[in-house]
Amino acid sequence: MKTKALYWWNYLLGWRFLPRRLQDWLFGTGTRAVELISGLGLLGFALAFANHAALLTRYPIYHKFATAPPALTVSVLAAVGLAQLLLMVWHSPRANILSGFVLLVGGVLWFLIFAAFSANYPPFNPSMALPFILAAVCSLAGKNLIDYSRLQIRTQERYGKDGSP
């Protein structure tokens, strides 16, 4: 059973206090923007490592990337980036659940990139901040997209396709 504090935390973190139309935009168009930025970013990293992995891992900021085989790094980053971009095409609630899951996986990858860059701390640099921000945004967007899509599915099952009683 949820406590009252946990209920309010989920309520705020899930953006459920927003008007319904704003939630529709946020978890539709807004999340698509996050998917686009994250997908292109992951593909950019994959392309950079596909072409220059040996050279990149010589730089101190990229030295932790040498612990994984370049082929694995490239394939995982490219697969998740492509999946995020391809799933943007479908807009059904069930497709959005899959899209939310891929956003969560992308959030984990962005956090791992942040951790690899942070291994070179100090000094703090911008390449530490951006992956952390993307990890947080992708994780929140993915979780909320899944929750919102499940709510849409339950509403459609209860009231029909248009969601009105």
Image: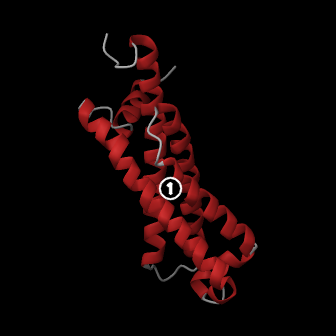
Residue plotted at (57% across, 80% down) = 120
Q: Is residue 86 left or right of residue 151?
A: right
- Image coords of residue 25 (percent x, y): 29, 41
| Residue 91 visible in the shown view | yes
**Quick one: 92 or 127, which is closer to the camera?**
92
- Image coords of residue 165 (percent x, y): 31, 10
Residue most extreme to the right: 69
| 58 to 84, vertically: above or below | below
Look at mark 1 in the image and give the residue it sits on: 85
Residue most extreme to the front: 89
| 85 to 151, vertically: above or below | below
Q: Is residue 41 left or right of residue 77?
A: left
Which structural element holds mark 1? helix
Q: How many marks?
A: 1
Residue plotted at (31% across, 15% down) = 164
Residue 14: which quarter of the image?
Answer: top left
**Quick one: 73 or 112, which is closer to the camera?**
73
> How dense is the environment of label 1, judged by Cα within 10 Å: few (below 14), some, or many (20 and up)?
some
Which amino acid lies under the numbered mark 1 shown in the image of this protein?
Leu
- Image coords of residue 72 (percent x, y): 73, 67
| 8 to 107, vertically: above or below | above
| Residue 119 visible in the shown view | no
- Image coords of residue 121 (percent x, y): 53, 79
Report the coloring of the rendering: secondary structure
Residue plotted at (60% across, 89% down) = 59
Residue 58: which quarter of the image?
Answer: bottom right
